Image (spheres, helix red, strand yellow):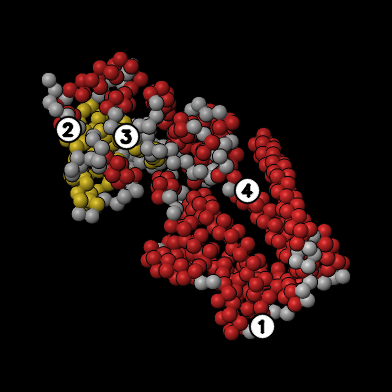
C-alpha cells in the first residue's frame, strides 16, 4: 500500500500540446516529476517554460494532452513575491495555513517560527509588505510557500531578480526546507548555474513552438555541490551542443 | 498577549497621530476665519457679516429651537438619497465590473449621467415628484449614483490577476477569496467613491430644498435670502459646512485610515 502511495505522488505530463489562439506555444511535451525530485526547466525567454509551469499548477487548462498532478499539497513561488498588500507579513506567510483551517494562534506560531528561520525579524512580520525591502519580501514569499509543507514546489524564476548574496542564502534555505519536507520541485529558470546547483535533472527546452530537446541528470547530491563544483559544471553545460543550440548560441570553439 | 499589546499600542499611536494632525487643520481653519473677518470688515455687514455675527446668529437659531429640526430634515433627505445610491450603485457597479460586456455597455450611460447637471435632474424631479421629500431624495440619489457605480466597477475590473493566481495556487476556498483577496481591493476603490458621493449629497440636497421644499436648510436659506438677512444666510451656511466637516473628519476619515492602513508609505 505504502508503495502505491509513493508511486501516485508524482506529476505526469503526457502528449501535451498547448496554444494561445492560433499560436502553438507547446508541442508534444512529456515530463514527469517524481516524489522528492528536483527538476529544472531551462531554455531561452519565450520558449513556453512559464506556460508549462502554469499548466502544471493548474492555472491553465491544457489544449491537448494530459496533466496529472498526484501531489497533495502543491504550491508555487512566482517571479515577483506577490504578497497581499493589505495583509501584514505574518498573515501573508500564514495564508496557506489559514486555508487548511488552522486556528489563528497556531498558524501565527507556525509562521513566526518559519519566518525567523528564513531571516525575517519579528518587527518585519508586523509590517505590511510595502514596508519591506525586496529581499525581505522574497524571504516572506519563500516562507509562505514552505509554511504549508508542500510535497511539490513550483518555482517560476523565483530568484531571478535577487542579488547573488541573497540568492545564495535562499538557495540554501530552499535546499534545507526541501530536504526537511521531502518536497519535489519543478523550477523554471534561465540561469544555468541555478539549475546546476539545485536540480537532480535539467530539462532543456527550445522555443517556437516550445518543446523539450534534451535532458541531463546530475548525480552528485545537492548538499555536496560546492561553489567551485557549481562553476565547473555550469561551464561544462554551457559547452554542450544541445544547450548551445537551445539558447541560440554559436557552436563552441 | 504580546501581539494584542502591540496591536493596542499601534492603535493608540495612530489615534494620537491623527488627533495631533488636527492642529494643522485647525490652524488653516483659523486662517480662513481671519480672511473672512477681514473681508467682512472691508465690505460692511450688509454684504458679508463677520464670523462672530454669523456664529452668534447660529447660536440664536439653536437656542430658539429653529436650527435642529431643519438640520435633521436635511440630513434625513441627504442620507436617504445617499444610502440608496450606495446600495444600488455598489451592487450594480460590482456586477458590471464582473462582465466585460456590461462594463462596455455601462460606460456611455455613466458618462451621460455624470455629465448631466444636477439642476437638470432637479427640474425633472420637480415635474415627477412635486414639492416634498421625493424631489431632494431623488436628486441626491441620481447625482451620487454614477460616482459610486464607477468606483465599484473600477474596483472589480482592476482585480489583480496575479493575486487571483496566488489565491488559486494556495487553494483558497471561496469565502477566503472574497474576504482576503477581492473585498480589500474593491473596498479601496469603493470607499473613496462613497466619500466623494457623501460630499456631493450635502451640496445637492440643499440646492434641491432651496427650490422645492418648505423645510430643511435649503428652504431656510431661501427664506433668509428673501429677507436680505445675510447674517442668517451665513449662519445656515456655517451649519451646513460644519456638518460636512464633522462627518468627514470624525466619521469617514478615521474609518478610512483603519481600512486602508496598508496604503501608508
Query: Is B93 in front, or is A28?
Result: B93
- Of badges 1 and 4, nearer the viewer stands 1
Chain of the residue under the numbered disc 2 shown in the image? A
Tell me if residue B189 can be seen.
yes
- Of badges 4 and 3, nearer the viewer stands 4
Tag 1 near tag 4, CB within 8 Å: no
Secondary structure of the residue carrying tag 3 is: strand
In this rendering, the answer to whether B16 lies above or below A123 is below
Whether residue A91 sits left or right of residue A24 in the image: it is right
- Residue at horizontal 43%, vertical 61%? B98
Query: Is B116 in front, or is B174?
Result: B116
Q: Label 1, on which residue?
A: B131
Query: From mark 4 to mark 3, how far is it between C-alphas?
Result: 41 Å
Q: How many other residues sit within 10 Å of disc 2, few (<14), some (14-19) or many (≥20)?
A: few
> Residue B257 — which label?
4
> Could you tell me residue A22's position as x and y percent?
20, 54
Q: Quadrant of residue B245?
A: bottom right
Tag 3 near tag 2, CB within 8 Å: no
Q: How many other residues sit within 10 Å of disc 1, few (<14), some (14-19) or many (≥20)?
A: some
- Residue at horizontal 43%, vertical 47%? B163
Secondary structure of the residue carrying tag 4 is: helix
Q: Label 3, on which residue?
A: A187
Query: From mark 1 to mark 2, how far is it between C-alphas?
Result: 79 Å
Amino acid at each position: 500500500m505504502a508503495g502505491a502511495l509513493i508511486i501516485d505522488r508524482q506529476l505526469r505530463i503526457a502528449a501535451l500540446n498547448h496554444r494561445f489562439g492560433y499560436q502553438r506555444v507547446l508541442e508534444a511535451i512529456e515530463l514527469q516529476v517524481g516524489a522528492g525530485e528536483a527538476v529544472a526547466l531551462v531554455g531561452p525567454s519565450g520558449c513556453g517554460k512559464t506556460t508549462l509551469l502554469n499548466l502544471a499548477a493548474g492555472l491553465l487548462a491544457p489544449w491537448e494532452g494530459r496533466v496529472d498532478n498526484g501531489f497533495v499539497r502543491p504550491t508555487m513561488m512566482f517571479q515577483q513575491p506577490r504578497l497581499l498588500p493589505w495583509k501584514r507579513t505574518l498573515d501573508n506567510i500564514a495564508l496557506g495555513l489559514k486555508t487548511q483551517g488552522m486556528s489563528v494562534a497556531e498558524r501565527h506560531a507556525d509562521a513566526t517560527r518559519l519566518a525567523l528561520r528564513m531571516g525575517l525579524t519579528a518587527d518585519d512580520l508586523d509590517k505590511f509588505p510595502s514596508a519591506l525591502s525586496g529581499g525581505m519580501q522574497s524571504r516572506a514569499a519563500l516562507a509562505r510557500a514552505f509554511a504549508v509543507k508542500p510535497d511539490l514546489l513550483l518555482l517560476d524564476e523565483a530568484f531571478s531578480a535577487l542579488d547573488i548574496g541573497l540568492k545564495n542564502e535562499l538557495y540554501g534555505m530552499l535546499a534545507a526546507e526541501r530536504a526537511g519536507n521531502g518536497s519535489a520541485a519543478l523550477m523554471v529558470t534561465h540561469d544555468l548555474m541555478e539549475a546546476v546547483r539545485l536540480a537532480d535533472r535539467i530539462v532543456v527546452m527550445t522555443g517556437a513552438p516550445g518543446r523539450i530537446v534534451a535532458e541531463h541528470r546530475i548525480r552528485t547530491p545537492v548538499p555536496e555541490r560546492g561553489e567551485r563544483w557549481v562553476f565547473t559544471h555550469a561551464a561544462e553545460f554551457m559547452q554542450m551542443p544541445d544547450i548551445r543550440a537551445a539558447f541560440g548560441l554559436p557552436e563552441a570553439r | 498577549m504580546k501581539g494584542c499589546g502591540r496591536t493596542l499600542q499601534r492603535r493608540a499611536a495612530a489615534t494620537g497621530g491623527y488627533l495631533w494632525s488636527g492642529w494643522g487643520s485647525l490652524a488653516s481653519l483659523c486662517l480662513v476665519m481671519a480672511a473672512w473677518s477681514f473681508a467682512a470688515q472691508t465690505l460692511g455687514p450688509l454684504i458679508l457679516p463677520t464670523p462672530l455675527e454669523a456664529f452668534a446668529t447660529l447660536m440664536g437659531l439653536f437656542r430658539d429651537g429653529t436650527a435642529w429640526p431643519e438640520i435633521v430634515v436635511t440630513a434625513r433627505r441627504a442620507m436617504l438619497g445617499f444610502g440608496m445610491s450606495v446600495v444600488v450603485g455598489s451592487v450594480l457597479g460590482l456586477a458590471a465590473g464582473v462582465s466585460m460586456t456590461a462594463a462596455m455597455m455601462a460606460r456611455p450611460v455613466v458618462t451621460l449621467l455624470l455629465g448631466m447637471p444636477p439642476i437638470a435632474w432637479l427640474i425633472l424631479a420637480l415635474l415627477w415628484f412635486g414639492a416634498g421629500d421625493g424631489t431632494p431624495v431623488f436628486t441626491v440619489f441620481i447625482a451620487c449614483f454614477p460616482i459610486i457605480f464607477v468606483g465599484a466597477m473600477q474596483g472589480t475590473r482592476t482585480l489583480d490577476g496575479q493575486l487571483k493566481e496566488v489565491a488559486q495556487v494556495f487553494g483558497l476556498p471561496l469565502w477566503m477569496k472574497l474576504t482576503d483577496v477581492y473585498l480589500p481591493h474593491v473596498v479601496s476603490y469603493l470607499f473613496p467613491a462613497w466619500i466623494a458621493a457623501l460630499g456631493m449629497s450635502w451640496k445637492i440636497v440643499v440646492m434641491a430644498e432651496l427650490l422645492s421644499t418648505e423645510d430643511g436648510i435649503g428652504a431656510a436659506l431661501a427664506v433668509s435670502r428673501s429677507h436680505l438677512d445675510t447674517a442668517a444666510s451665513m449662519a445656515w451656511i456655517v451649519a451646513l459646512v460644519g456638518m460636512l466637516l464633522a462627518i468627514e473628519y470624525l466619521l469617514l476619515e478615521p474609518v478610512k485610515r483603519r481600512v486602508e492602513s496598508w496604503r501608508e508609505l
